[in-house]
Image (cartoon, helix red, strand yellow):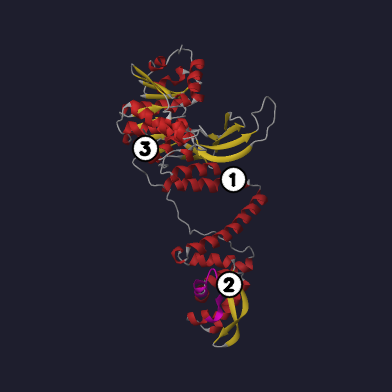
Amino acid sequence: MNEKIEFWPYVLPFPLEVEKRKLVWRILQSKTGMGILVNLKVDAPTYQKELIQQLPFSNKSIIEYLKKMVEAGILEQGMERKKIRKKTVWVKWYQPTKLGKWLILFLKPPGEISPKVAKKTLEELFKIYSANIVHVCRKYGINTKYFHDVLVEELLREHVEKKRKVRARVVVFGSAALDLYGNVERLPSVDETVYVDIVGVYPGGMGANVAVALARLGVPVAFVGKIGNDDSGRVLLENLQRNGVDVSNVKVESLSSLQTLILISRKGERRLFALGLPNSALSISSPNEIDWELIRKCEIVYIGEVFTEISSTIASYAKNAGKKIVYRPGVPYFKLGIEKLHDTLQHVDILILNEIGWNALQRSSKAKLEDLTDIQAYGPSVVILTKGSEGCEVLDGETRFKMRVPSYLSKRFRVVDPTGAGDSFSAALIKKLLEKASLKEAVYFAQVAAYITCSRMGASPAFPTLKEVEENLR
């Protein structure tokens, strides 16, 4: 029986002393005690006279149970001077302790407590709960990180499970990573230590970036990847959701999320370091982690940095389902050589790579790759080689053309950070392919989107909207 049991949404700060616990139970078993609790205010004092007027019990019984509640640690009591009918008199008030607040929240349906009061009260209760967790961990030798990981993991799973699915036109397979930007005086030499000033933290990862960039361009998109059950994973997932990406197929694992350290020297030199632990959430690692219905219902499948054994399975399935496949695995995968990528490439329609990736592929392959046409022999009919500010070279079947970045863009935008340019280019290209535009039109649109992205810091926050790209088209 795997039914999920729902619990009352408030933590339990019950007293440890046996006598106090017995007294609390006696109060809860009494109609008078329950009546008082239900009529108490959570966030303000309640006067004794008010309770006597409201409740259908004798004055003696009410006062007796109020005393018991103070003794049990449910209520605090006090006196204050109050003006009643031109006379100043002393009145008695009672206010719930943290235990009392919890009991009131427990007895009243959640809808009867204002969100503001519930939030404030639960924050107080959570501090008690957290302190008790630390105490239990020390007593029984349990690592507190375990509880932290469980908390974050449950938060992320709830995000994924409760997120409304969209009918995705594009399914993106790839990785998600948190990008840390650090300024250095200069890039270090061998064995040299330099101080890194972290100046920005942005959601990233090539696959996740493409998904976000597509969503910004108004394309319904689903992201399939893996994140760790840590704070980085939370940031990455929230960013995808905030941008309207379907995350219902994101896998949350008891792993660490990927991080990328981007060092920038005073001269503008850049170095990228992928920070991973032995157990990092790199990518989906089994066909069982894929909802194949997503592929059947979409129009284009984008495959990014995915293990080659899985990428070949995805590409084969998508090709048999009649889908267009865009492949952009990144430099680490090109370093495996063309032979290792062949099982995926034979099903691919469009391969996108940059100059660093092309050089890595040439060096790492046993086969002699002298020209982009040599890649076509392994499957993709379209090969796009991006060259940064110089534009790109496109091989479409037997047709070949070069497209420089439109010169007017450099007058409108200043290049600040090229980190997400390739992701933005890929997403914008796919956007136009969905609209049945020609390859030249799609490449031009993609170059404009990529240039706008370069004018802003970070990857994910820099991706333009459809309106921004269209406003900068000539």
Camera-side residue of 162 and 426:
426
**Residue at which label 3 appears:** 470
Q: Residues within 10 Å of mark 1 (few under 14, many from 20)?
A: few
- Distance, label 3 to label 1, CA atoms, is 49 Å
**Residue at which label 2 appears:** 95
Label number found at residue 26: none
Q: Which residues are magenta?
A: 35-49
Taking the spot 59% from the left edge, 40% from the top edge, the residue there is 199
Is residue 287 visible in the rendered image? The answer is no
Taking the spot 62% from the left edge, 32% from the top edge, the residue there is 266
Q: Nearer the viewer, mark 3 or mark 2?
A: 3
Camera-side residue of 69 and 196:
196
Helix, strand or loop at disc 2? strand
Q: Is residue 307 above or below residue 112?
A: above
Residue 188 in percent (x, y) is at 66, 28
Q: Nearer the viewer, mark 3 or mark 1?
A: 3
**Residue at which label 1 appears:** 146
